Amino acid sequence: MSYAIAHPEVLQDIASKRKETTMKIVMIYDQIQSGLGAKDDRNLPLGILKEPVGPAIMMENLLKQVGGKVVATLYCGWGTYADNPDEVARKLEAMCVKINPDVVMCGPTFNYAEYAEMACRIASDLEAGGKVHALAAVSQENTEAIERYRDKVLIVKTPKKGGTGLNEALKNMCLVAKALTDGTDTSELKQKACF
């Protein structure tokens, strides 16, 4: 299995921008949210973009309000992840640690079950690793992933694809990210915005 992973100097360049913003964020997307494919492009290799794409563009104003900025977008197709979830999870975690963001946002996954599983797993692994904070953002239709990971990582509620409430969900993602970064109590946010 081959991956289109950026050269080490790209990761180092992103990591060096740490002092430019209060809260440095990495997004993890599937082929659809990254804008690099559709449902059928399941085997998009693992890769990195040095800018915000997809929902992160919609979040830029909200992120500014909490002092945040997306510095990189990591992406992977559902099929690539499903072929070897342990290896992909390990590589995504290693890339995140190398970039050294304050927080990683996995999602929003909407109601794409395969992406929800990937997002929750990666966020959970990052939190368990203790080097980088992470959250997942999924819709209520992803019951299996929610039940499997809700006690391991914060999972922000989002609407399904085409549903209402996306702006509120994106705002909640930013608020949860800020709370994780600041080390503040997340219990109230969890009750209001998470599963």
Image: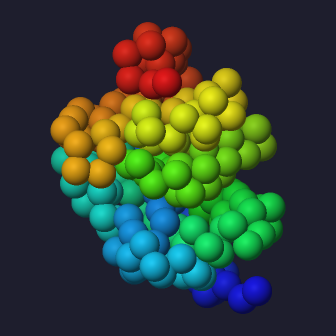
Q: Residue at x 30, y 51 (%)?
A: 161
Q: Residue at x 30, y 57 (%)?
A: 55
Render colour scheme = rainbow
Q: Residue at x 43, y 72 (%)?
A: 39
Taking depth in this image into account, of 65 and 166 the one nearest to the observer is: 166
Q: Quadrant of residue 85?
A: bottom right
Image location of residue 32, percent across then percent down: 39, 69
Answer left or right for 1 relative to 18: right
Using the rendered image of the protein, determine whether residue 175 is visible from the camera's viewpoint. yes
Relative to residue 135, is residue 13 depicted above or below?
Answer: below
Taking depth in this image into account, of 163 and 149 the one nearest to the observer is: 163
Image location of residue 122, percent across then percent down: 65, 51
Image location of residue 24, percent across then percent down: 46, 51
Using the rendered image of the protein, determine whether residue 51 is visible from the camera's viewpoint. no
Relative to residue 36, is residue 72 depicted above or below?
Answer: above
Q: Name the quarter where the N terminus is drawn.
A: bottom right
Q: Residue at x 56, y 57 (%)?
A: 114
Relative to residue 58, is residue 4 depicted above or below?
Answer: below
Q: Quadrant of residue 12?
A: bottom right
